[in-house]
Amino acid sequence: MKKPWSGRFKEQTDPFVEEFTQSVSFDYQLALEDIEQNEAHVKTLVKAGVLTEEEGEKLLKELRRLKQLVKEGRFNWRKELEDVHMNVEAYLTERLGPLGKKLHTARSRNDQVVTDERLYVKRAVKEILALLKELRLELIRLAEEYADAVMPAYTHLQRAQPVLAAHYFLAFRELFLKDAERFEDCYRRTDELPLGSGAVAGVDFPLDRFFTASELKFNRLTRNSLYATFERDFIVEFLFCCALTGQHLSRLAEDLIIWNAEEFKFVELPDRLCTGSSIMPQKKNPDALELVRGKTGRLYGNLVALLTVLKALPSAYNRDLQEDKEPLFDSHLTLRDALKATLKVLQGLKLDRERLRACAGNLLLITDLANYLVEKGLPFRDAHEVAGRVTAYLLEKGKRLEELTLEELKRFSPLFDEKVLELLKPESSVERKRVYGGTAPEEVLRQIRVVKAEEGLE
Ligand code: ARG
């Protein structure tokens, strides 16, 4: 097959090199963006007087037909045509003869590829934002369902202090809100049209780039043709947003995996979201969550891969940039599916309220005991010391804090009075955390109202 650049070549491309350099085996995923871009380019060329109205109509008609073929999966991508752009052009040329060959006027694959990619990232961000929103709504629903459930919060994976389960869910909702803000920010910087930048210097024909931008719904134009063709920071940003969101999903998944273990049994995961073992019949494994956790590795890897491709790359376009696509597609699809899987788990999640409450008392209330003494006038360091001695006593006697009598407590400090006994349950502990951002029921209910309003729920 004759290559589009064959004019200056005397030999055929080596078959291995052809295979090595081709990108259509993965950049076919830009097909719809490429067709959309071609449609806008045809209209721009007509407007510039490079094509006649009639020529424009013919090209648009074939592009519509091609779109249909692609959507139905009936288009035959050919590796010898190298990439998605050349496949589209070859199709038009086969259908329309010399007219198809005119389409590449005032355009290079260098501005074409990055236009497709910006369109792709914009679409991907919108999809991820919708899923992040669903996830936040699900977390708010869980917060409301478990608004009154107390549970142990951990630091160093040691039981620390009681919190409301609602507080836990709202914490992750905060993370996913920040993720959404970062994706929106990435979207704003991606929303620039590069087309019209040509190979590196701009193009010779009087293209109305503002018209092309409005056809493709770009908010702005890139302002420098060199920048436009070699910049891939918008993809780096997208990959970073995916990596960070992946980190958040992995932490949520890890908590739920731990809570699902026999030793914790805080949660029950529905059978439909778990898988079994081929050898141990008793097993019900949280594999979906483990994969959400594990896929974070790819999301980080993709980010580092592209950063490394870009390092010290000479200006402007180099073929190295073709390596930006697989990380982009992979992070998009990986994060999308990790979000969907997490959503399913949250929708099916059941917390064991009794078990959570049973684990939220005893030594988790020791800090409250110290604070009680502070309220009675003891400096905090001294109060901490007294409460520490109470802890040692409990551990030695194998007793729980709730079992202590006032007499026993008074042995540690005369400041203890009968009111302290009311403190010795998780509900009293959370009740006292009324500070803004704390876990007191009153405060958490206020937070739920605020986040619902932020999500446009009421
Ligand atoms: N497949 C190429 C890429 O992804 C398209 C641009 C090729 N440009 C070139 N001058 N060879 O980067």
Image (spheres, helix red, strand yellow):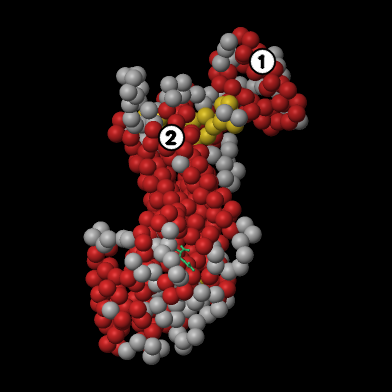
**83 or 357: nearer the viewer:** 83
The front one of 307 and 23 is 23
Q: Is residue 344 above or below residue 207?
A: above
Quadrant (top left, top right, bottom left, bottom right) of the N terminus = bottom left
Determine whether 38 is above or below 377 in the image: below
> Is 253 drawn above or below residue 370 in the view shown?
below
Dot 1 and dot 2 residues touching (CB under 8 Å): no
Q: Quadrant of the C terminus?
A: bottom left
Answer with the quarter of the image where residue 277 lies.
Answer: top left
Q: Residue at x 57, y 45 (%)?
A: 437
- Residue farthest toward the top in the current orientation of the protein: 397
Residue type at tag 1:
Ala
Which numbered disc, 1 or 2, marks the residue that appears first in the sequence?
Answer: 2
> Helix, strand or loop at disc 1?
helix
**Residue 323 visible in this rendered orientation of the protein:** yes
Q: Which residue is mark 1?
A: 392
Residue 260 location, x and y as percent? 42, 28
Q: Residue at x 50, y 42 (%)?
A: 297
1 vs 2, front mark: 2
Q: Position of residue 3 (x, y in %)?
A: 39, 69
Residue 262 location, quadrant: top left
Q: Amino acid at mark 2?
A: Glu
The residue carrying mark 2 is 290
- Image spot of residue 347 (x, y percent): 35, 41
